[in-house]
Image (spheres, rainbow, N blue to C red):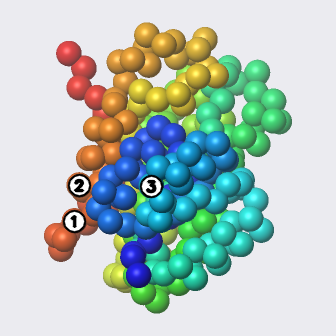
Amino acid sequence: MKNIIVISGGANGLGLELVKILIAKNYLVCNIDKDEIASKKLEKEYGSNYISFCGDISNEDFVISVVNKINKLGKVVALINNAGSPVFKMPTEYTAEDVDLCFEGLKGMIYLSTNVLKNMEKSGGKIINIMSSAALRGNKQESVYCATKWGERGYTESLKSCYNGTKVQIYGIYPGGINTNFYKNSRDYVSSEKQATFMPAKDLAEIIYENIFNDKKLIVEDIIINRIKF
């Protein structure tokens, strides 16, 4: 029975590049994603190495049901909290719908981690929280988005404190801008030309994997990754 890695938002962008690496390394990848079309396409491509669960990670009942199903498949050795949706607007332009969308990633991180940790506390494993450089500073037109990322950072730091000295390892990943469709609904803020200068998702995924999934008796708890600017 293969070791399982659970990832949220693994059907596109950085998540997809991580999925490709993990499958190549012979893990069984369970992706939890809203994008049913892309997820089902990956199931056809990767067969028994990939299983998709389509739904909203900010729905606690859905998360509990999915994690219970995954636990029956084998041992979960890692959870990668990657999913999130941005809304980039001036502070006075945010609506309640925008706020709810931004907070989906934070809620999902908490719900997924809570339920995966129930078994992982006994057997050990890795919780990898992929956030953003927006968790490290305040950015123009990102007030609510930054609020959720700072919340994710606080949650990550609390997990580190709780599981220090145990078999559970907690990682915080803080990448800068990534060249993906993440900004497709925010062209007034991030143009296609600006996006093209951001980090390649494939390169970023490789750096994350190399630092976390190795046999060294060391842990890189926090990874801040930015592109080189000439």
Residue 195 appears left or right of 207: right
Name the secondary structure under disc 2.
helix
Looking at the image, which is closer to me, 186 or 137? 186
Q: State the mark number for residue 214.
A: 1
- Distance from disc 2 to disc 3, alpha carbons, whole Å, reads 22 Å
Locate the N terminus and report the quarter of the image it occupies: bottom left
- Distance from disc 1 to disc 3, alpha carbons, whole Å, reads 23 Å
Which amino acid is tagged 1?
Answer: Asn
Name the secondary structure under disc 3.
helix
CA neighbours of label 1 inside 10 A, class few (<14), some (14 to 19), many (20+):
few
Which amino acid is tagged 3?
Answer: Tyr
CA neighbours of label 3 inside 10 A, class few (<14), some (14 to 19), many (20+):
few
From this viewpoint, is residue 9 visible? Answer: no
Q: Name the residue under label 3.
A: 46
From this viewpoint, is residue 66 visible? Answer: yes
The mark lying in front, picked from 1 and 3, is: 3
Q: State the mark number for residue 210.
A: 2
Measured as percent of width and height from the top left, residue 47 is found at 48, 59
